Amino acid sequence: MSYLSVNNATKQFGESFKALNGISVAVERGEFFTLLGPSGCGKTTLLRSIAGFNDLTSGEITLGGANLRVVPPHQRDIGMVFQDYAVFPHLSVFDNVAFGLKPRKVSAEAIKARVAEALAAVRLDAMADRLPAAMSGGQQQRIGLARAMVINPQLLLMDEPLSNLDAKLRIELREEIRDIQKQVNIATIYVTHDQEEALAISDRICVMNAGRIEQIGTPQEIYGNPQTQFVATFVGTLNFLNAGAALDAMLGQLNLSAAAAKSWAVRPEHLDLLVDGAPTSDGATLSGMVSKFTYLGREAHLQVETEVGRLVVQLANPGMAATKAVGETVSINVQPSAPMAFDAEGRRISSKG
Amino acid sequence: MPRFNFWTVVMILTWVMLFVLLFIPVGSVLVSSLYDQSGNPTIANYLKFLGEPRFHQAFINTLVVGFGGLIGALLLGSIMAFCVSRFVIGGGRFVSLLAILALVSPPFIGAYSWIVLFGAGGVVRGFLRDMGVNMPPIYGVGGILIVFSLKFYPYVYLMVSGALSNVNRSLEEAAEGLGLTPLQRTFKISFPMVFPALTAGGLLALIHAIADFGTPRLLGRGYNVLATEAFTLYSAEVGSNMSMATTISVVLILVSMVFVLLQRYMSRRNVYHGNMINKPVRIKLKGWRNVLAHVAVYFIGLSGAMPVIISVIYSFRKTSGPVFQSGFALQSYERILFNLGDVVRNSLTFSLTAVALIVIVGTVVGVLVARRTNFNTALLDGAFMVPYVMPGIVIGIAFIAAFNTGPIVLTGTATIIILSVFIRRLPYTVRTTASSLRQISPSMEEAAISLGYSPFQAFLRITVPLIVPGIIAGGMLSFVTAINELSSSLVLYVGSTMTMPVRIYLLILDGDFGTAAALSTVLLVLSGGAVYIAFRFMGRNEQALL
Ligand SMILES: Nc1ncnc2c1ncn2[C@@H]1O[C@H](COP(=O)(O)OP(=O)(O)O)[C@@H](O)[C@H]1O
Ligand SMILES: [Mg+2]
């Protein structure tokens, strides 16, 4: 049995609205597990029912085999990191971090040592005596992290801990969180709506939508092999291909077919431009006219009007020569592995003939 | 079945308390106004109010001093706010201090000091008479309006300067870019943005002016308003007419209610378009403009604080009986020490008891309101209007009407004075506690719970320390209100429960200005100390005094 398991969790608000609708997840010891989904999909609700701040309408939660739902929240021994930091403004940085050790009957010396260690881990050792009020968001969240970790909890929960920080700090701090988590090896559930953050930080990702699970898998599986149309569009972007003779011809050429397919799509980064005159060994070729060129530095997006519709092609490392003018004609190479097929319910289906 | 826990008990007790201290008194006033002297139901009192010129006059006079006070306060307050927030004024903090002094000194001290200077035997008048200039004494409506304008301008000043310093400068710059002249900018951009603050502050001045009893009583000399009429009818040795007094109280409540509702509507519209990035800058004026701005600001500030200054100076003057002699002495203070110790002690014990009750009950009920959303907040909103719609005189009369006979008899006790102060100030404490609790993120307590503290422990260790400074500050400000309360105590006191404001009032009526000045100074020192402590705990926040 898994370390933490949530079984068929349902949470109802009001008469009929289900914020969680039959959620089952299993988290292993030491695992970094991420809940990813758009805002309002129920991530916080799930996290808070694990922490004990709201009770499930139905379902089971066990931690290390024991039923967690009967344990009051302050006895669950679960560390929590909040989006708004929730740092205690009237306590010094040291006292903030030491706060959770007091009810655990840790000796004064041990408190000193453990707090010092935790503060060093989040690089705040020089600020132990300061009051947190005037500190930056990044520093406050480091306090929050140290405070949650120092008690050696059985589980660490983080609810969008980085979403109030600016972009650069977000990347810096997420690396730190990842490193520290691997060091202390505490099973962690991390909530975010940022797909890039989820891919960068997680051992496994659970993509949620409207109170349900769309897919659970490693970052590679989630991005590379999305099982639903929702996952494919939420984690990355998709070009949907217009149905018609041109699409049928292209699929025939690629030797792909799926009887139940409702829609076909390709990721922009799975399309390539054909260099003039160069012969193609495999794949299909679509030609079209450039309608927009967006230069983004490390990549460029080329919008092309083709027979299967408007396609965005992502060009990596675009040099000077890669610049295209609007109206120019280009040829796009589509590899057989690129198109994905989805059925009427949005489920991914096999596209092999 | 609802669980019978601590909060259920608190909820029930709150309702009982509001019922006894609010509904019964207000109900008694209403009932009393609908009965004649011999106990038969009648609407004759209201017909009499409509019929008698004496009452018409009081009604009109009340509106005159209300709107006069509003206009005066608007004029002085907005000039001061504009100058202080737009120009560099030397000693700006001192100017604010003057405004605070005007705000925390009881209005009857103002009346008294103006009598000292410009009354029948006034110093300035006497001086001018010696110079051959004969000016009329300050009594009557003119004097009342001068005192009200100088006493209540801080309401407008504090509200408008708050709004003005938050007007986003980008808006004015944009208007400048569109080619508007400075005058056009002021009227088309700044004025509309501070208009709600102007009206809210002005109406606050009006509400206080309508409720004030001491000033028209001491300065009016026949210029009667509803508050003084109600008191006269209640207290007349011969022909005391309780049912007419309560009828006038009902009218006064209705008049106040109209303006309080208007004021609340305006305050709610008073949303500052705050922008921390582009705050307006203060211009450094040059030449005569600079002189003019300074003269205006200091003239208003010093005139407003003059009662304080006068009473401090006069408290040290040598006296012989009630008559001032030249030179200085501590005689007036000696008289307080030897003859008026019980009055000072009464004031202190009543105020401290009331404040302790206000703080404890207010905090518990505030937590109830903030944390149990099922509490009827509309009721709280209603209760919050009490201190404004029920002038002190009316509260006093209502408490007499409610607790003179019947199941609870309290007249003549210290309890009734303490409770009258308590109920006026309680809603404020409940409101501030609830709003400061709502500002504390719930995740703060959740963090403590996740770290191993029970919910109650988390509340004690995290939430309580965070709201305590605000509660102490609020308690101090309640103390200022409590110890300066004149009008309800004047109705409710008996010989043994006399307080300092009542004594000062009586001393002024007796013409013993020296002792009155010394007692006023003691009152001012106590109020000033309380305000100082409050500001220490919550930062210098003049807005909290409103
Ligand atoms: N206490 C509550 N009462 C009613 N609805 C709630 C409550 N808490 C959350 N919800 C609703 O449940 C849904 C999921 O909320 P939440 O778990 O906070 O989403 P997320 O964290 O994924 O953004 C939202 O539609 C939200 O409005
Ligand atoms: Mg959330």
Image (cartoon, rainbow, N blue to C red):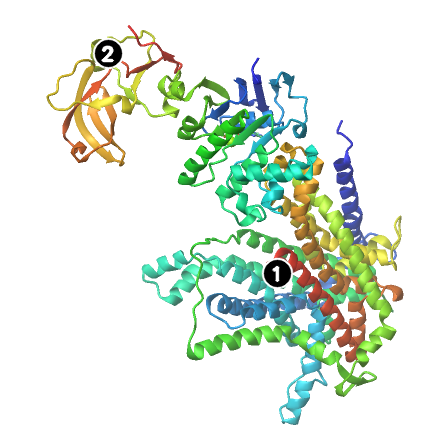
Q: Quadrant of residue A233?
A: top left
x 32%, y 59%: residue? B177
x 71%, y 47%: residue? B363
Image coordinates of residue B208 in percent, x first then y, are: 66, 63
Q: Is residue B293 left or right of residue A153?
A: left
Q: Nearer the viewer, mark 1 or mark 2?
A: 2
Q: Amino acid at mark 2?
A: Leu
Kind of element beneath mark 2: helix
Image coordinates of residue B130 in percent, x first then y, are: 66, 93
Question: Label 1, label 2: how many angstroms apart (C-alpha)?
Answer: 77 Å
- Residue at the spot of label 2: A251
The local crowd at label 1, few if under 14, some if 14 to 19, many if 20 or more residues have their Cα within 10 Å, is many
- Residue at the spot of label 1: B204
Please say if A294 is above or below B537: above
The reply to whether residue B544 is visible in this rendering is yes
Q: Chain of mark 1?
A: B
User: Nearest the camera: B506 or B142?
Assistant: B506
Q: Chain of mark 2?
A: A
Residue A124: assigned label: none
Question: Is the residue indicated by label 1 positioned so its CB lies within 8 Å of ligand 1?
Answer: no
x 78%, y 83%: residue? B329
The local crowd at label 2, few if under 14, some if 14 to 19, many if 20 or more residues have their Cα within 10 Å, is many
Q: Is residue B363 left or right of residue A316?
A: right
- Where is the C terminus of chain A found, in terms of image quarters? top left
Marks counted in the figure total 2
Q: Name the outermost residue toward the left.
A: A277
Q: Amino acid at mark 1?
A: Leu
Please say if A72 is above or below B484: above
- Where is the N terminus of chain A found, in terms of image quarters? top right
